[in-house]
Amino acid sequence: MKSKQHDFRLIKKSYDARFEQIKSQFLKQHNSSSFLEQNAKLCDDVLKQLWVLANLNESFCLVAVGGYGRKELYPSSDIDITIISNGLDAINTNNEILENFIQLCWDFGFNLGVSQRVIDEIPKDIKDITIATNLLESRLICGNSLIYDKYNKKFKKTLNIKNFILAKVKEQTLRHQKFSKSGYLLEPNIKESRGCLRDIHFIRWLCAAKYGDHSLKTLLNSNEITKKQLNLINFHYNKLIKRRIFLHIITGHQEDRMLFDYQSKIAKDLGFKNSPDKKASEYVMNSLYKSIRYIILFNEIITKKFTVEFNLTRKKVEGFSELYLSNGLLELNKNTKTDISKKIFTYFHLYQRNPSIEGFGPNLINSFIATANLINKPYRADENIQKDFLQIFKEKQKVNRSLRLLNRYNILGKFLPVFGKIISQMQHDLFHIYTVDEHTLNVIDNLRRYSKATLKHESPESYEAFKRLKNPSILYLAGLFHDIAKGRGGDHSSLGEKEVHKFGRMFNLPALEVETIAWLVKNHLLMSNVAQKLDLADPTVIRSFADEVQNQERLDLIFLLTTADIRGTSHKVWNQWKSVLINSLHQTTTKYLQNKVTNEQFVNQRVKQIQNNLIKYSIEPFMYQKNWTLMGDGYFTKFEAQEISWHTRLLLSHANTDKTIVRVRHQKGGQGIEVLVYTKDKNDIFYKTCHFFNEISCEISQAKIFTTNHNYALNVFHVTYEDESSLRFKDFFQYIEVNLTNKIDQELNQDEINISKNLMKKSRQANFHQIEDFVELINNNGLFHLQIKTSNRKALLLSVAAVLKKYNINLSNAKITTMGERVEDHFDFKNSDSQFEPKKFENDLLILLQ
């Protein structure tokens, strides 16, 4: 026993020394393939010794499977093994010995993935696509080689190649959907995301199934690819392998996400350096995206080559003798002598107009790629080709899919060099999770969704607005150009406007179309800013916005572009509350454009609407007129009609109450709640409210602070919560109404005001992007406007409220705007205190936010 323990320790000591040597060699030479092979060989040697130490006999063989079977063993990867025997009797008889071997592996520190197989159960095992895939990449480590040969031979004979390939294609599609259907995330998973390592593993599995060899060189030997394609795919494959090895070494565990935290470290280790224009991490990510781009393209070509042979039927394409249709793919005859270089966009018209065409065949894709390399200035200036390109935006179907494919086949960036500049361009803010080109294509995807009656339920107002458009191609082109100037420095909206004018001149677009597209690009952030940062109940805001958009057509265009743009940034940024705000601005502006009125007329219309709402509850004007007088004239420009209707009903007999009133209702649009606080104006209402909602893990997304003529506070808070699945709203509302009332009525406990303790640290994304904190205080004769821009984090608003409390500031208004992981908050207050020091106040806020 002591001898075995001694042997175990020696094996462990030897392994640790050899692993450090392999790792050190990699960090010096960056030879990724050598590292993987040596690491796999090292584990082979250890497992052989543990196999002997456990006294396993000739009834079994030990087999490496999965990545370990391919001899691709990363520093922190699982070590997948299978123990094979002739039958269950051998397993049952030697169960204790087998368990001892597995325990030795765990004690050694291996992250083991272990399974047991018997020859008779191959037909059953093979039905599980995961097991079948693992076994395709198996290799013998030690034990009875006859058992392994027998098992392997029967496995290959039993495997149905067609069923396996089709199952793997389906599995890949589901994986792509799980990982956002995109590899162009700012923090991609370099193992599982589209265009990353798993997409190459998929190709190797198809090779192993069809040809019995998972080497990529098999594709060359089988005339599926050229020598150049093999060299390219190996180059990009090795690049991703190297980065994954670095990730494991840097983090010390199995981390496959290229998080911002690690990008700079990997860039430094790889020798990338900062330049005046870009960080080193941007260079390393741009290089990665180039590899992802090629792997996505290569994966598509090989997948189609392997599946097209399952359906050999061909259908002629009328008017195009060089083409045929097979299995839903438009394909090019191999022996054609037709010059297709000027027909590329025409082929896309066929794709758009024919529902039965689902894509392009591998021969045609290779021809697209070859043609892309030939695109030059005379090609771009050809009027017929220009017309064909513009026609893609005018077609009724597959506009977004066509642009995605044109981008994938390297045509879009070559034909429009200005678009080529944003390919793989990173975005250093806290809104976007995609590169600029991927975000742009996502925006056009969203615009297309608005056009489809089958998706009307997603956004009925967007669907109706899209139906009113006379020329949707204007909208698609605005979507294509809205971020075209990102990454250059300066205002990308204004620079993008100039690019539209250049494009319009080159393509001879009608002047009115160019003017509209340019206006949309220049103002594509306008509607979002107005909806999220200004008071939509204020008639002046609506009139100013309406004067800018001028007419219903432009209003509908900017509305659709705005919502598609926000939805295309990140799933965290778009929510129902933003939808409500932007829809409300669209609806209100539509009414204004139909009947332009003065501010006074606007308020009168609002009053009439409120009265009509109240009469439904049998509430007559004489019953609330006195209360309205107490509220003051500013009340009707501060709140919208449905809000005032709610207040009026609640406060009908409580306008002069001595008690604090707190009431809760569901927010318009269905996401979050609306909380009304009505009480005699007193200090600390805002701070106490922030403290209360922070304690119950709710976030204030908007606050309207209003003081009536008779010195009552009428504050309305829009509040969101993390998980509504466990809420019983009746109890939740009652809890807020009772406990927030108590909180406001109680004396403030000074121990609660600990500013530094409340605020959480900035997120790793905010630190990486080095988003600057912005605080600006503007004094207009004692009326102060405070603006704060910073990264969002837990207890931010509470901490700001604590600083306001410290300076005895009572707010007259607050606009809390959360945009993903960024916030822009606006506060208004009066202060006639001669001791108030604005610069010190600003400085305290900046220190807090750091």
Image (cartoon, rainbow, N blue to C red):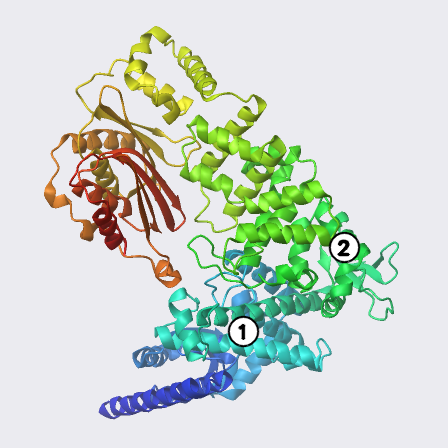
Under circle 1, the secondary element is: helix
Q: Name the foreground residue: 613 vs 638.
A: 638
Kindly identify the amino acid type of the residue bearing the numbered disc 2: Gln
Please report the residue visible at 15 percent of the width from the left and 45 percent of the height from the top: 753
> Dividing the picture into quarters, in which one does residue 279 lie?
bottom left
Is 832 positioned to the left or the right of 722 in the image? left
Rendering coords of residue 281 (x, y %): 45, 70
Quadrant of the frame with the C terminus: bottom left
Rendered view: 538 above or below 331: above
Q: Gap between marks 1 and 2, in whole Å?
A: 64 Å
Q: In this view, does 676 lie above or below 168?
A: above
Q: Is residue 160 visible?
A: no
Point 57% across, 82% down: residue? 150
Q: Residue at x 25, y 88 (%)?
A: 5
Q: Which amino acid does label 1 sit on?
A: Asp
For residue 504, side relative to residue 289 (left or right) = right
- Mark 1 surroundings within 10 Å by alpha-carbon count, few (fewer than 14), some (14 through 19), many (20 or more): some
Mark 2 Cα shell of 10 Å, populated few (<14), some (14-19), many (≥20) = some
Determine the residue positioned at 70% across, 61% down.
Answer: 415
Dot 1 or dot 2: first in sequence order is 1
Q: Confirm whether residue 483 shows in the render.
A: yes
- In this view, the residue in front, 727 or 376, is 376
Which quarter of the rendered picture does the N terminus lie within? Answer: bottom left
Secondary structure beneath label 2: helix
Q: Mark 2 points at which residue?
A: 386
User: How many numbered marks have been drawn onto this rendered protein structure?
Assistant: 2
| Residue 11 percent location from the top left of the image | 32, 90
Residue that mark 1 sits on: 120
Q: Which of marks 1 and 2 is in front?
A: 2
